[in-house]
Image: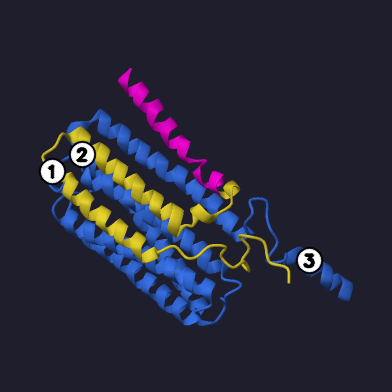
Amino acid sequence: MAHPPQGSPGARPSHAHPNYILIWVFLAVLTALELTVAFLPWSKTIIIVILIGMAFYKAALVGLYYMHLRFEPNRLRILAIAPLPLFAVLVLAVITEFIW
Amino acid sequence: MAHAAAVHEDVMLPPATREAGAGVYNEKLGMWIFLGSEVMFFTALIGTYVILRFAHPTSWKPPGQVLNIPVTAVNTFLLICSSVTMVKAFASAQDGLLQQLRLWLVATCIIGATFVGVQVYEYTHLIEKGFIPSEGLYGSTFYTMTGFHGFHVTMGVICMIYVTIKAFQGKYTQTDHRGVEVIGLYWHFVDLVWIILFTIVYLI
């Protein structure tokens, strides 16, 4: 019997389900940590760097495991991350203009 | 006549298992392209917010002084919970557990609608306190970003209800549950955007 191609609706997942509950626990714990870090009497710059790092880590967990990017073909991963450099370009370009 | 019907079927109903250019079926590819445009949309909003905060740092109040962080933290937790119920729904569909699929979808609908309800509650209290959209840069950026996100969640809940109804009608099977996967991608994206927004709007 011919197997349907990967990514098609008839395809069985080629991997075991990730531990979705464990990832949910990670996300919840990280959110609690964010709330703690936000009110620590540390330098504002350090707090911002930590908070943004944690936010991006949480976003990556959602993208990789809940949206299954970790298991998708490379072509789809490229499609998914292609718009992200635009964020850096936009912010850097306008900040540069602001500084000048 | 039979030949014409066969041709019609070939054109209008491509085999569900046909592999497309990106290695995925068309609906999923379409959703990813749509999400790419959404990334650019929210990138514009977030980028503008970052620039404005750099340019006018005194227009923003410290975290927790105006916005109700405990309530929003609970709401953030709710959205994370809805993501896990959504992904469990998809996993159930993959495993052919259709009863579980329906239950997880119903849970996702309820939690998603609760998120919207809490956001309406938050808005009501902020407006009562005098924090309105015309309240300078802080107010306008806050309501623009959270408002557009709330609109996306609301649309997601409506689509989720539609998918849930179809699930109860038995339209999804272990071998074809495209609707569940596609709405799931949208839902997780909305969760992902909120993770970023919660940090930069409420905590920084």
Lower sequence index among marks 1 and 2? 1
Q: Amino acid at mark 1?
A: Leu
Residue position marked by numbered label 1 in the rendering: A40
Q: CA separation, marks 2 and 3? A: 58 Å
Q: Tell me which chain appears blue.
A: B
Residue toward you, A9 or B150:
A9
Calculate the distance from the C-alpha at mark 3 to the C-alpha at mark 1: 63 Å
Q: Which quarter shows the C terminus of chain B?
A: top left
Q: Which x, y percent locates residue B175?
A: 61, 73
* Residue A84 part of the magenta segment: yes
Check disc 3 and report the residue beneath it. B10
Tag 1 subunit: A
Task: Report helix, strand or loop for mark 3.
Answer: helix
**Which residues, given as a range, are shown in magenta?**
A77-100
Secondary structure of the residue carrying tag 2 is helix
Quadrant, the N terminus of chain B: bottom right
Callout 3: residue from which chain?
B
What is the display colour for chain A? yellow
Tag 2 residue: A47
Q: Amino acid at mark 2?
A: Ile
Query: On screen, B18 above or below A50?
Result: below
